[in-house]
Image (spheres, rainbow, N blue to C red):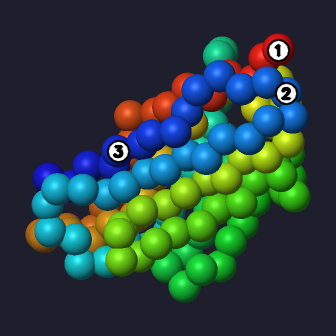
């Protein structure tokens, strides 16, 4: 069974940086299509932050454009989110999401979430 395992969250001061990682592990993976990062602040809906296609095309939400960079390493089945110039409004649980073709099916997977807190 494929799993997405996230790491890299934590507490950072405004203006600081963090790098999130998400690796697809276990199971047999034939191909990973779009990989995404979402954020969910307390009491709010889960919103798309950034997307990267298998070919490397990227999309960013307006609120993070120019500050966040999504990238992926297809050989490692891993997606990254480099977050710079962090603001208190970026405080949220960040979830990794991916469209994965594995044995028997192609489906959407979610990671467990990692907390990012931006505060002085």
**Res 23 quadrant in image:** bottom left
First in sequence: mark 3 or mark 1? 3
User: Circle 2 is placed at which residue position?
Assistant: 14
Residue ranking furthest to the bottom: 55
Q: Are marks 2 and 1 in contact (CB under 8 Å)?
A: yes
> Could you tell me which residue is drawn at 79 percent across and 24 percent down?
13
The disc at residue 5 is 3
Of 59 and 106, which appears nearest the observer? 59
**Res 32 quadrant in image:** bottom left
Q: What element carries label 3?
A: strand
**Res 115 quadrant in image:** top right
Q: Is residue 89 above or below residue 65?
A: above
User: Circle 1 is placed at which residue position?
Assistant: 120
Q: In this view, does 30 lie to the left or right of 60?
A: left
First in sequence: mark 2 or mark 1? 2
> Could you tell me which residue is drawn at 22 percent across and 71 percent down?
29
Crowdedness near tag 3: few (<14), some (14–19) or many (≥20) residues, C-alpha within 10 Å = some
Q: Where is residue 98 in the image (x, y as percent from the top left)?
A: 43, 59
């Amino acid at each position: 069974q494929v799993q997405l395992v996230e790491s890299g969250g934590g507490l950072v001061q405004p203006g600081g940086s963090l790098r999130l990682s998400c690796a697809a592990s276990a199971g047999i993976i034939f191909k990973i299509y779009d990989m995404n990062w979402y954020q969910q602040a307390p009491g709010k809906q889960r919103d798309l932050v950034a997307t990267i296609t298998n070919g490397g095309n990227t999309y960013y939400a307006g609120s993070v454009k120019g500050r966040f960079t999504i990238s992926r390493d297809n050989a490692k089945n891993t997606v990254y989110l480099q977050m710079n110039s962090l603001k208190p409004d970026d405080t949220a649980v960040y979830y990794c999401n991916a469209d994965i073709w594995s044995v028997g099916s192609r489906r959407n997977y979610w990671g467990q979430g990692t907390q990012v807190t931006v505060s002085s």
